[in-house]
Image (cartoon, grey):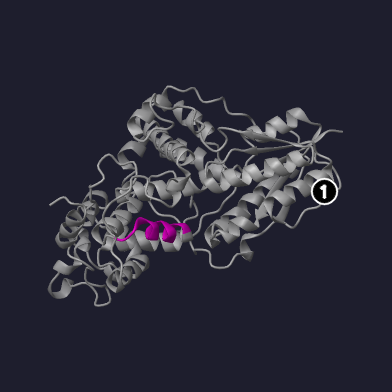
Amino acid sequence: MTVSVVLFTSDLRLHDQPALRAALDATDAVVPLFVRDDAVAEAGFTAPNRAAFLADCLTDLDRSLRERGGRLVVRSGDLVEEVCRVATEADADEVHLAEGVSAFARRREERLRAALEAGGRRLFVHEGVTTAVAPGAVTPASSDHFAVFTPYFRKWSGQHPRRPLGAPRAVRVPDGVGSEEIPARREVRGASAGLAAGGESEGRDRFTAWLRRDAGAYEDQHDDLAGDATSRLSAHLHFGTLSPAELVHRAGRKEGLGPAAFVRQLCWRDFHHQVLAARPDASHADYRPREDRWRTGRDAARETDAWREGRTGYPIVDAAMRQLAHEGWMHNRGRLLTASFLTKTLYVDWRTGADHFLSLLVDGDIANNQMNWQWVAGTGTDTRPHRVLNPVRQAHRHDPDGAYVRRWVPELAGVEGRAVHEPWKLTGPGRAAADYPEPLVDLAEGLARFRQARGRE
């Protein structure tokens, strides 16, 4: 009997799973394997919210495999050592996994290939599993990647993504390969109280319901903070419980501006992945270096702490930061304006904000988190690096009656209408509660400081 190992990483699903399909086609039996990699924990990537969501994903994946006669094998330790150990136990000749784009994933892949080849085994790496279009599949004539989104989107839109694969009907797993217990969410300490459930089944149900009910309004309402009309699928995309290629395929079959706008957002995700694949150091270094210096020192640290806690004195910023703490997720418009406030109004290093987001975000993806922070900070791919999002104007535009702010900033729950966005202007009985802070900085002063630092005055 021939055997292969399928190493699951950021592709925790059975539907549209090219690595699994290739292994099933090539051998008589497979070992579906997930390794709780020590190196991931040491690098600080196992934040409680992601650990809890991951537990849901693995539980669901194991259940789906058992429905097909298989099971999930879970191991802990050094990924390369554990994969080689499982391959030896199963007498497997080959290992299949999805391509990664980060420097960490690439180094791990190289180590795994070398170790397997030393044992006479082969590694097969499959492209286009975690993205709709594989990084590097479309490039401009003069570079190895696109640095501007719009021309990338035009080229990306002309591609024909592969047709999604169905889930296998049966998965045969050889005897004699032991597994640890599947981790459970209840074992994770420190997860956000409002964290959503994970797993392929949950993700597919959520996408189907959203596509049927809310997709048509997505173009007009996806920036409505209180309306919350986004798909909320980012965590499922990060863990690969949903296939980007399948989402593009299914959304693309629906008519209207809403589904088209959703597909465009999926393209943004692919865009960031192709940037990071070409420039791995952009996960920690400025994609476009700056000559000036970020603010540091006691005042900057104090203001950054207030930003983390959602006590900046700007209600829309504080509401978004508190949503992040409670749910491990933040509305995309909230991400843009909180990042702009930290990097351009407070003028604090984008890496500080990116690290805080990664400590809480259930969808904490290196490519999207880091490249979005760089985009907002003006060190990334934004063609208007000096743009500043005014939090008051953003609030009036995207939370016009203040419902989002009142939901997340209870101190201001009694303030009616648009006045909730500028509580420092209230007088008399309508004055905001005493425990809500005054603004950390005057917006005009912050803008002037930013422009001076960037040489715009």
Q: What residue is rendered at 15% in x and 69% in y?
A: 426
Q: Which residues are magenta?
A: 348-358
Question: Does 355 appear in magenta?
Answer: yes
Q: Is residue 311 visible?
A: no
Pick whichever, 375 or 115, lies toward us.
115
Placement of 80 over or under 188, stated as above or below? above
Give the overall secondary structure of the magenta segment: helix
Q: Residue 81's spot in the image, x, y percent? A: 73, 51
* Res. 319 image quadrant: bottom left
- Residue 432 sits above or below residue 286 on the image: below
Q: Does residue 225 appear left or right of residue 32 in this picture?
A: left
Indicate yes or no whether the magenta region holds residue 281. Answer: no
Residue placed furthest toward the bottom: 434
Q: What is the three-letter code of the residue carrying label 1?
A: Val
Residue 201 quadrant: top right
Residue 56 at x, y = what percent? Answer: 61, 53
Split into 4 quadrants, where in the image is the N terminus? top right
Q: Secondary structure at mark 1?
A: loop
Q: Position of residue 421 (x, y in %)?
A: 22, 61
Residue found 40% across the figure and 46% down from its top = 371
Depicted 239 relative to depicted 154: above or below: below
* Left-right relation of 363 to 52: left
Few, some or many C-alpha atoms within 10 Å of disc 1 (few <14, some 14-19, many ≥20)? some
Q: Residue at image x 68%, y 49%?
A: 34
Say which residue label 1 marks: 177
* Residue under the point 53% across and 59% down: 49
